[in-house]
Image (cartoon, rainbow, N blue to C red):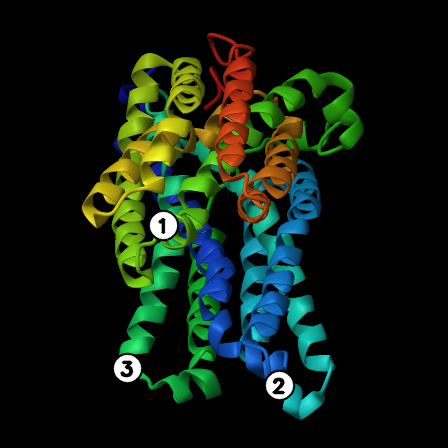
Amino acid sequence: MTSAYYTGEERSKRIFAIVGASSGNLVEWFDFYVYAFCAIYFAPAFFPSDDPTVQLLNTAGVFAAGFLMRPIGGWIFGRLADRHGRKNSLMISVLMMCFGSLMIASLPTYASIGTWAPALLLLARLIQGLSVGGEYGTTATYMSEVALRGQRGFFASFQYVTLIGGQLLAVLVVVVLQQLLSEDELRAWGWRIPFVVGAIAALISLMLRRSLHETSSAETRKDKDAGSIKGLFGNHAAAFITVLGYTAGGSLIFYTFTTYMQKYLVNTAGMTAKNASYVMTGALFLFMVLQPFFGMLSDRIGRRNSMLLFGALGTLFTVPLLMALKTVSSPFMAFVLITLALCIVSFYTSISGLVKAEMFPPQVRALGVGLAYAVANAAFGGSAEYVALGLKTMGMENTFYWYVTAMMAIAFLFSLRLPKQAAYLHHDN
């Protein structure tokens, strides 16, 4: 059944729902990543030290703590979405992110309240980590359920459009502030501005999400297994393991060619930091724009085929691409190589949430999607940079390339377990 069966009013409502859900996703990721981009300015305010590296390590530790909270957020919000509705979960997650951002924006410094300052900063990041951990699974579930039949891949792809868009917007806001304020002003108070912007944007998203219609039914919410770990692992353990298997590879290669790649271009290829920033900004923008096209492709060739292409191409080309980037000297050539890598990644990211949602029935869908993603992301995505840099310091940098390749081969094998037709969602809506 295709989207032609929908009335004009129904189509409009569903498209607005996609916008409402994805707007919050953009805000969540903006708020989560703006911390990383502003850390260089606020680190001395919370971690006084004569050594800037120690300051940055402390802020990085707080950033990592946010990652570790994601599985807990995936569990809490997945349960909430399956038992009390997707809309409630979406609204609470964006409200928590708003609170976390406002908290960071208004925190007193170490000079004012001593060790309470870094402790409260950590608390704010834990709140944000919980929020973003819950955001992915609920948004993926909601967008897959509200998307028009026959165009699910296209509409679900906007989850990663806004996820990448949030990262790009965070960079853009910091760049604008760098042009408008001096270094001293940024260190004194300017770093607070992006967090205020994020909190205001979260409130706007909250207003949009209040008008969303609920996609889960009262019947599934009242099911004895709704949102329960027992219901998930008792009846759908195989689906959970399958999702975990290809998400591990998907998260690892995503972070390898996005967040880690800027450092790789500088530390390994010897590119200037400014050129690396230009290359990655351009590549991420194109990556964002590509998502709907790969989503549409999945509507034509099937989700399983998209995932098999992702696993196979990732296995074959990860080592050649990283080896070529290792010795690249031209920023344009680096842009081309990274774009090729991100095209391969797009087979996965464009349908990432949807292909997971199609594996679970509605009563445990948000929990299954959110928990599997959060666990794999924290273990493999969040550790990508540490593993890569650790192996480099040991003089074994090439081993990292083969590690990513092995995980892509595993993703391919798990993708073979995907049904040729979605077990769930096929006849929904």
Label number found at residue 265: 1
Disc 3 residue type? Leu
Q: Which residue is mark 2?
A: 108
Task: Return the x and y of residue 36 as percentages of the image width and height.
Answer: 49, 63
Residue extending farthest to the bottom is 112
Q: Which residue is mark 3?
A: 180
Name the quadrant containing residue 244.
top right
Residue at the spot x=66%, y=48% of the render? 73
Disc 2 residue type? Pro
Residue 9 visible to an observer of this rendering: no
Vertical side of 112 occupied by 292: above or below: above
Which callout, 3 or 1, points to the residue nearer the camera?
1
Badge 3 marks a residue whose secondary structure is: helix
Q: Earlier in the sequence, mark 2 or mark 3?
A: 2
Q: Earlier in the sequence, mark 1 or mark 2?
A: 2
Vertical side of 282 occupied by 310: above or below: above
Task: Return the x and y of residue 133 as percentages of the image width and height.
Answer: 60, 47
Badge 2 marks a residue whose secondary structure is: loop
Distance CA(mark 3)–CA(mark 1): 28 Å
Which callout, 1 or 2, points to the residue nearer the camera?
1
| Quadrant, the C terminus | top left
Frontmost residue, 355 versus 202: 355
* Relative side of 305 to 340, left or right: right
* Relative side of 383 to 185, left or right: right
Residue at the spot x=31%, y=58% of the render? 277
Frontmost residue, 82 versus 214: 82
Task: Return the x and y of residue 263 as percentages of the image width and height.
Answer: 42, 53
Vertical side of 364 occupied by 130: above or below: below
* Relative side of 200 to 225, left or right: left
- Do the numbered discs 3 and 1 sit on residues whose CB atoms are within 8 Å? no
